Amino acid sequence: MSYLICSSHTWRMVSTPTVRRRRVGAELRRIREAAGMTLEDAAKVLECSISKISRMETGHVKARVRDIRELLDAYGLADEQRRNALLNLARNADQQDWWIDFSDVLSSLAQHYLSLESDAAWFCCFQPLVVPGLLQTEDYARAVISAGQIEETPEKVEKRVGIRMARQEILFRPNPVRLWVVLDEAVLRREVGGREVMRGQLKRLADAAVMPNITLQVLPYEVGAHAGIDGPFVLIGFPEREDPDVVFLENMTSSLYLENNEAVYRYKLAFDHIRAEALSPRRSEELIRKLAKEFV
C-alpha cells in the first residue's frame, strides 16, 4: 500500500492510494481473473506496460474511465449495473473532500489519513500519550496542537483545531464509525492546557464512553509492562471486506501505514492483549469521572 519515507530534510511519498482507488483496482482485478486473463493480456488491450495494469489494480495510479471501459469490454463483462457502478466509483475516486481547503496546513500524508478516516467503518486505538483527536475537546486540541506545532502561527493553529473538530463528525453521522479506544492512565492524569481544560476533557471522555458506537477503556498504572509498550497505534477497518485493514503509526517527523497481513495481525493481537488487561468500560468511565472532579 503505502509508506512515507523520511530523512532529516526530505519527504517522499511512496504511493498513497485512496480507499476509492483501491476499491476500483480490486474490482478490476476480480473481473480480469474471472475472465481468465493475465496482467499481460490486459496490458495488450491498453497497449501499455504490465506495470501500469498492476498499479491500477493496486490503486497506486488512477484508472481512467476510458481505460476501464476498454478493459471491461475485453473481459466480456456484460452486467450493466456492475459496469456503471465501477465507472461511477472511478469518476469519484479523486473527488475533492472538505479538507482540500486546508492544504496549507495539511501535508499530503495527512490528507490521505483523512481520506481513510472518512471511509472507515471502525477504529481500534491505543494511546499512551494524549486523548485521540476524535475525542478531544476544542480547548484540549488547541493545547496539544500548540505544544506540538511550535513553529506554527496562531492562525494555522486555529485552522488545525477546526480540522480536528470537523473530523469528529464521523462519530455522529447516520451510520457512525465504531471506535474502541484504550487510554493509558497517564493520559488522564497529565495536565494539558490547565486544570479547567482537563476537567472539560475528562467530562467529554466520560460522556463519549456511554455512546453506543464508542468503547472506552483505561489501562491502569498497576498493569506495568504491556503489549503496547512500544507506543501508540491505530487499526482502521473499512465497510467492504475487500479493503484490507490498515495500521497507522505516527511520530514527530514521519508516519507509516501498514497493511501487510502479518503486521496487521500482530497489532490486532497486541490490541487484544491491551484491552484484556485494561479496566472494564464501566470501571473506566467511573475512574474518568472521578479524576474529572480532581481537576478543580
Image (cartoon, helix red, strand yellow):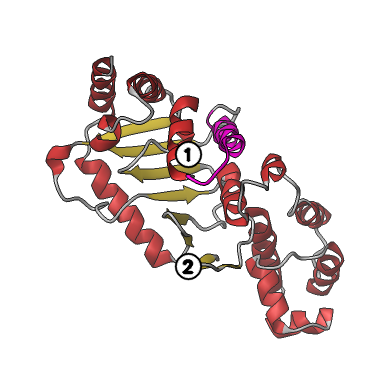
Query: Mark on residue 253?
Result: none
Q: Which badge, 1 or 2, comes first in the chain's sequence?
A: 2
**Front residue (pair 193, 21):** 193
Where residue 257 appears, as percent x and y from the top left, is 48, 60
What amino acid type is highlighted by mark number 2? Ser
Residue 222 visible at all: yes
Q: Residue at x 67, y 69 (%)?
A: 57
Q: Quadrant of residue 186?
A: top left
**Front residue (pair 222, 65):** 222
Q: Residue at x 83, y 69 (%)?
A: 67
Q: Quadrant of residue 44?
A: bottom right
Q: Secondary structure at mark 2?
A: loop
What separation in Å lies between label 1 and label 2 (alpha carbons)?
22 Å
Q: Residue under circle 1?
A: 145
Q: Residue under circle 2?
A: 8
Q: Residue at x 56, y 37 (%)?
A: 157
Q: Is residue 200 on the magenta stretch?
A: no
Crowdedness near tag 1: few (<14), some (14–19) or many (≥20) residues, C-alpha within 10 Å: some
Where residue 229 appears, as percent x and y from the top left, is 24, 53
Q: Provide the residue span drawn in magenta.
A: 150-171
Task: Assign the magenta stretch its main secondary structure.
Answer: helix
Where residue 136 appears, as percent x and y from the top left, is 45, 30
Residue 34 visible at all: no
Q: Is residue 168 on the magenta stretch?
A: yes
In the picture provided, is 273 more to the left or to the right than 32? Answer: left
